[in-house]
Amino acid sequence: MKREYPDSGTSSSGGAAPKGKHPASAPPSEEDVDELLAALGYKVRSSDMADVAQKLEQLEMAMEMGAAASTAPVSDDMAFFPETVHYNPSDLSTWLDSMLSELNTPPPPLPPPPMPPPPSVPSFAPAESSSVNFDPNPISQSDPSRERKRMRTGSGSGSCSSSSSSSLGRGGAGTTTIGSESIEPAPVATPGLPVVVVDPQEAGVRLVHALLACAEAVQQDNLKAADALVKQISLLASSQGGAMRKVATYFSEALARRIYRLRPPVGPISDPSTFDSFADLLHMHFYETCPYLKFAHFTANQAILEAFAGCKRVHVVDFGIKQGMQWPALLQALALRPGGPPSFRLTGVGPPQPDNSDALQQVGLKLAQFAHTIRVDFKYRGLVANSLADIEPYMLEDESGDGELEAVAINSVCELHGLLARPGELDKVYHTVQKVKPKIFTVVEQEANHNSGSFLDRFTEALHYYSTMFDSLEGSNGSPTEPPSPGQPDHVMSELYLGRQIFNIVACEGPDRTERHETLAQWRRRFSQAGFDPVHLGSNAYKQASTLLALFAGGDGYRVEEKDGCLTLGWHTRSLIATSAWRVMAA
Amino acid sequence: MKRASSSSSSSSSSSSSSKKLKSEESPSPIPDLTEDLLYEVLRRADERTLGAAACVSSRWRRLAQDERIWESVCLRHWAALGCAPCQLRSVVMALGGFRKLYVSYLAPTVPTRSGRRRRWSRDELQMSLSMLSVGFFGMMGGPMGKFPPGKGI
């Protein structure tokens, strides 16, 4: 045996090297054994390599100590194990376990690992935190065989639980929710540090199940179960990497807020509709890092440009002007119009500022300066309104009365869904728009149904939608016009931008829940019932969108689709944002 | 270098290139062309040559970065835009210039090793102009884009 031991020792350390590559080259066996050791006749699962190595070391130490202690000659090690039944040594892990137990080297007891409450687990990667500020460098834990962290789920496991293939069945009650592959009492290198061993794929599935189960518990008002599940979710989420972890963290945070009734007050962090400088910043970063808002702006602009063909005086009403990022491109396109630019008037609508600063005026000044630079005649009016329903037609009237009628375009980018939170507001807005009689009413909205009556349905929909969104953020490299930074800080901002929407959808109710997205089909119905006809976005808009993606999206997964005259942008097969255009039905 | 249409410039360029060949021991001097000639030559060069030429000396750099040259670089490849060239010129110059337009927004569309010049489509052109506008707007009022810094327009 001693002769075999160094062999297996070296080969196990040799076998440790191709650990990472092994799965690709493994013969298709259920046990997924290590090749090199298998050649020697030992069956060891490649995922168990690290603890097999550890146990071998322990065995060696134990035998050395034993050899030093006893006076018997060392030649025959069999003397140490007089009554041992040697189990199948080819199953190396089990055999080592039995050896170790024979030598009476009880593993030092691990600290009892209860389900640690999420905020206080120190050993998890620093990115794991239930606060809103996320570490911009997520630690990728995708290869479990490399980062072997283990958790003892119960002190009763004993020394006979082994890490052979059927460990899942034998795991015991505590492990099934974690989905760990090997539970065993082998001592950890640094005892006292609770760690987690999970198979990320399996944990991913369990994570989604846990999220949905928690949402269901919340819907049934079973807050205790929901609370327990939230903690599990955080645990599972830490085993994932990248987009999945971020999404899970945001959703579990949102669920926690809902459970503990931490209704976010109407304030900067949680309320996505607050137009303050922080929200501006997030919005700006989201604009820069992914093509959704650019797509929205450029397609809407194209529709407006075409609607304004031949008009000498034009008026654009922007239902949510924010930073005014949409309008420089339109102004430039109008400036290059054959025949010269029209007189341009812009009305920008925005919410009142918490700090009484006049952000609307500042945006107007900046746009005016821009228009002056490219020699477009420009006028601006800012409208402060808490809700779009407060706008009356007279506020949008042309006061100069030059004689020539102005052509009006109304533009709304992700502003209409908020109106669904209070009954009657959307109808009021429709009514106002009808009075104004615009040439075109461009509407951009998220393509998802986050407004169904059932909380669970909303939650499930939102989970899929935002998972896809986060995937796309992960997959794209950002615009090539940006400096080649690692891009992480920008992504964090964009993620937070989306995270606030998640908080609102999951944690808020009633008038606070303003992120009431609806699908294109639903909006179509509303518009038709309100007396609007669709305007088909032309092929130019489609080509512009395709060009945008080709030039600036950076990721291959984006797709532009045309649906009955509307354009949608999505990631792979899922549409995420839709642009449509409408005009008042001819009486 | 492309052959210029005027024979004097071609003869001077060939004589300067033969001068270059002769004096291989000492580092070859920069061809001593007058500004007009240099401009004429560079006006017909392609983008990569212009980039290389801008690295030769400060005088060459100034000429290679001349907006008129870059305007012709951009217009050379465009299909009809539909507006008058002077209209385009005034807008683009106001928003940062043709060289910026090319470098920031058109060059990324060209595959790096393509020797063949391609024509940009109208949409690519319009997209690049839109991005130029957005970029200019974003940079107004200093690097943070906060506007106005307190002064009048």
Image (cartoon, coloured by chain):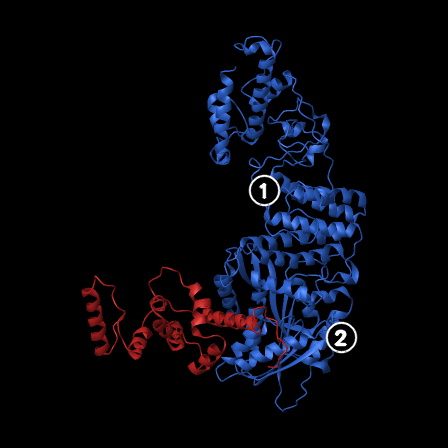
Chain colours: A blue, B red
Q: Residue at x 61, y 37 (%)?
A: A199
Q: Quadrant of residue A197?
A: top right
Of residues A553 and A562, the one drawn nearer to the viewer in this rendering:
A553
In the displayed orientation, state which residue is furthest to the front.
B26
Q: CA distance from mark 1 to mark 2?
A: 51 Å
Q: Which residue is mark 1?
A: A141
**Kind of residue sitting beneath label 1:** Gln
Q: Tell me residue A561's x, y (percent).
A: 54, 61
Subunit under mark 1: A
Of residues A370 and A407, the one drawn nearer to the viewer in this rendering:
A370
Q: Tell me residue A202's x, y (percent).
A: 62, 38
Circle 1 or circle 2, nearest the eye = 1
**Kind of residue sitting beneath label 2:** Asp
Marks 1 and 2 close (CB-CB < 8 Å): no
What number is the disc on residue A390? 2
Q: Tell me residue A272's x, y (percent).
A: 70, 62
Pointer 2: residues within 10 angstroms few (<14), some, or many (20+)? few
